[in-house]
Amino acid sequence: MLISYNWLRELVRFELSPRELAKRLTMIGLAVDTVREAGDDYILEFDLTSNRPDCLSHLGVAREVAALVGARVHLPEAKIPSLRGRAGELISVEIEEPDLCPRYTARIVRNVRIAPSPEWLADRLQKIGQRPINNVTDITNYVLHEQGQPLHAFDLDRLRGRKIIVRCARRGERILTLDGVERELAAQMLVIADAERPVAIAGVMGGEEASIHETTRNVLIESAYFDPLTVRRTARALDLHTESSHRFERGADPEAALRAQERAIALICEIAGGEATEDALDLYPRPIVRPVVALRPSRVEALTGVAVPEEDIIRILTALGFHLKDGERIEVAAAEQPLRFITPSWRVDIEREEDLVEEVARHRGYEKIPEELPASKNVGEYLYGEERRRTARRALAALGFDEAISFSFINSAYEHGFAPLPTLGGDEVEFVKVSNPIIEGVTLMRASLVPGLLEAVRHNFNHGTRDVRLFELGRVFARDPHGERPRERESLGLVATGGALEEGRALAQRALDFYDVKGALEAASEAMAAPRLEFEEARVAHLREGQAALVRLNGRAIGYIGRLAESVAAQFKFKQPVYVAEIDLTSLLEAEARKVRYAPLPRYPAIVRDLSIIIERRISWAAIRRAVLALGLAYLRSVEFADVYEGQGVPEGHRSLTLRLEYRADDRTLRDDEVDRMHEVIVRKLKDEFGAQLRQ
Amino acid sequence: MTEVDHIAELEAVRSAFARAFERFARFEGGAGALPLDEAESALRELSELRARHTGRKSALAALKKQIGRVPVEERAAFGQSVQRLEAEIETRLERVERALKEAVERQRIERERLDVTLPGRRPRRGHLHPITLLRQRMEDIFVAMGYAVEDGPEIETDFYNFDALNIPPSHPARSSQDTFYTSDGLALRTQTSPVQIHAMQRRRPPLRVVAPGKVFRRDTPDATHNPMFFQIEGLLVDRGITMAHLKGTIAEFVRRMFGPQTRTRFRPSYFPFTEPSAEVDYSCFICNGTGCRVCKGVGWIELGGSGMVHPNVLRAVGIDPEEFSGFAFGLGIDRMCALMYGLDDIRLLYENDVRFLTQFD
Ligand SMILES: [Zn+2]
């Protein structure tokens, strides 16, 4: 909203420069964004909060200035030179919807001459960003910006049947509004109609037909109070936001209707000539009553920390238009007697004691409230598991993964083809759907972080980055089948593609693969002191067969890992392998943390033997290790993976695997022949169970 | 044997050495220019030469054995001559050996000289998201000030997102124009404020909590808007809490966040869930309040909204507003992030462009 400094000074006397004024008003809650010089004037641009529609005019700002500097507001006198006839003789007004239109007033000026506005008027409007049209229309606009009351001017002779009916629109009714758009009206929209058709959308915009034209001679000025909610709904539904709807939907001053109308009539008579009716038709079937609010002076101190003397409270509130309801101090048992204030008709935001506390506080100045730290009766604490979340993040970053944050909603194209996080409820998972997306097609609350991460990979590919490692911590969602609140789980997603880059070296030494992502997943869970993750080959919707695994924690499936399936890769137009993983972080955080127990250091040396075998590819390392450990050899201390080799010298369908075996006794040094015997047992076991051959 | 014979023999040894040594003589002054392989083979040859001319079976050794057989009166003189010759040979051999060794050493060093300015070897490091970095810093500050970090669901009921926060049924924020709704009629939370309600249901006063988290508003993405962003909410409820405590707390936070010189400014404002309400500004961390491009010349930057918890909100969770009072505040993390790092387009925050992410530590 724009306010003219000079115009304001006509309404209230003050000695503040435009910039000082802007600063002072900002500090009492009327935020001034900019102050701009405009000829001999200054224009202040306000950014007002929605609870203060009363300040959406020069009068409204003047009231605050008056309270600020201790002055009074002077409204220009409305002198109407010639009066003739009564409004009721020229028009009849009927309100069909008194709840939606609690007050409607109409007054008429006859024999006006429509012409361009005089220069001073056109200039004023232009300075506050309004386009002059013609004298009568401009005057209604002028009064709106002066007093905050929206007015509408009709051409009396274009109102059919000499009748105004305030009613709801009928189905299929249309109106050509002043902006030149033909609009279809809906049944719950309030309109101003004549005997035959709507001539204005109540509180929003007038119709073209019954508005002021060059040939107009007789003018009807409407000044009304419309229900805020109705105006808001209509303006929203039509996507038509006007100076008028802006004020009505926030709440106009029902008591300002006649005063603003009189001011407009006086200006019309002065500028466009003509004679006004002696009176106005004033239908006020539902009087708007503002509350009487009690204020205990002690409450000001209780909420602001500053005691304000009673006379200061009364002075501030009186200056703002409140009236102390004298003689109504109720004797209460408590020592304190509340002050009772009658709220001014324009203050739609005042309802209760705290509202008055704010009025007192802001006019005394928030800057007068001291800064104090409250005595602490609490200890600080992080969110459950936050420390482990942080170490996991650090561990992943140390491994070269950058942290991503993606939108929580994903495109409906990903509804099928991606396995949701298993902890959300398996294959039966139903997506939470957004019914009013802002990005077309983005209607699903993600049930997996993977689609978002893949979009990030695509974005990076499109911008020339081919080596990408990302992780994300975030929530995934699923509908609850029993109609409870949706399930929300915290998930950890990983994606890796391209080369394993080194810091400061442009060329990767090797390509990233499955084991990089697996290693990252293990590092993250280790950083969180979670139990060891188990991996088991599995078929997963979005992963390539043979390079996909289910991730388990204490036996329970909590995620997936693998290479992206060709079909999904094709969907994203990926030409290089992409590896992804996702696990349920909530499960990891809830699992009992690994406990560290000290083990005494061995007193006797261990004997380490490497064992290389040729074995079928389908036999997994885990199965081999399990088989060796199942032998229960007393002195076998560990079975570690040493190396794997495929290719020359190894038969098709086989691989060469090297195990590192450590033998040790606690009470003596083992002899070679003892170790040889145990080693023999292992070799025989692998041969019998898997057909493994010793590699020469 | 005559004296002449001894002398002749001694001279013969000397000249034999001189002949053999001739090709090394040029290194006596240094072997700097010699290529490494030549220097190395010269060293080998030199040690052979040393063995031949000074070893146990050398002519010099034989000469030394003869000293005892020389007549007594000549013995001393002859002995001295042999010693001189030996010293002379040793000196020359050593001089050349040192020169060659130096040359070899020198060139080995040259050959193995490293470019110490090449990058050190380490895996490429990943980076935390700037939102995470800021959020963690804020959490640390508030935890140090005795606050508990809380969170709540991102998909909320109308009760938590609106009703309990004193947002009237007709409020525009509730419209499907501004708020995302699920097909089941739940709202994607539009603010972290519903966590206030959860927190007050979980904990009774005295309580102090902060709730950082994701929120959603139906804004079309552009340079200054995202339909999803992060906020941090703070709430303190106790007996006798006033706006002075709100001001003191925010001022302390801002000093810890932006430095001890940072000042705060409270302006009256409006939020349905606080009364009185205040908008908080802090003095610009770039210009310290004198006005610059970052603060658009005014010296102040908007931090967020705050105020005294509305009595209706306290009542909604069964806390008597006559007995307890509290303050609440909410700050936008994304906007702070944009200001602190000078982002000109906040869509970058959720595009996950590696070129962007790697800029933050
Ligand atoms: Zn600045």
Image: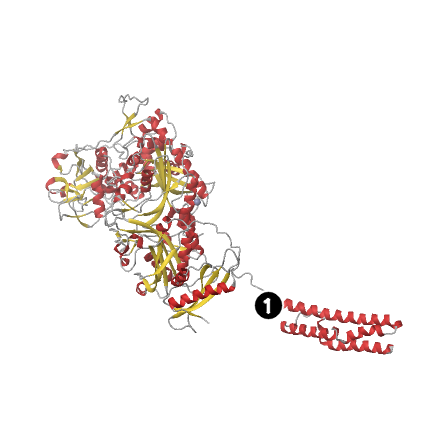
Q: Quadrant of residue A537?
A: bottom left
Residue B165 lies, in percent from the top left, at: 29, 39
Q: Report the amino acid beneath label 1.
A: Arg
A24 in relation to B27, above or below: above
> Can the viewer see residue B302 in this picture?
yes
Residue at 77% across, 74% down: B61
Q: Nearer the viewer, residue A360 or A568?
A: A568
Q: Chain of mark 1?
A: B
Residue B255 lies, in percent from the top left, at: 45, 40
Count of numbered labels shown in the rendering: 1
Residue at which label 1 appears: B111
B28 in relation to B329, above or below: below
Q: Residue furthest right?
A: B73
Q: Is residue A625 left or right of residue A211?
A: right
Q: Quadrant of residue A350?
A: top left
Residue at 84% across, 78% down: B5
A515 in relation to B343, above or below: below
Q: Is residue A214 left or right of residue A73?
A: left
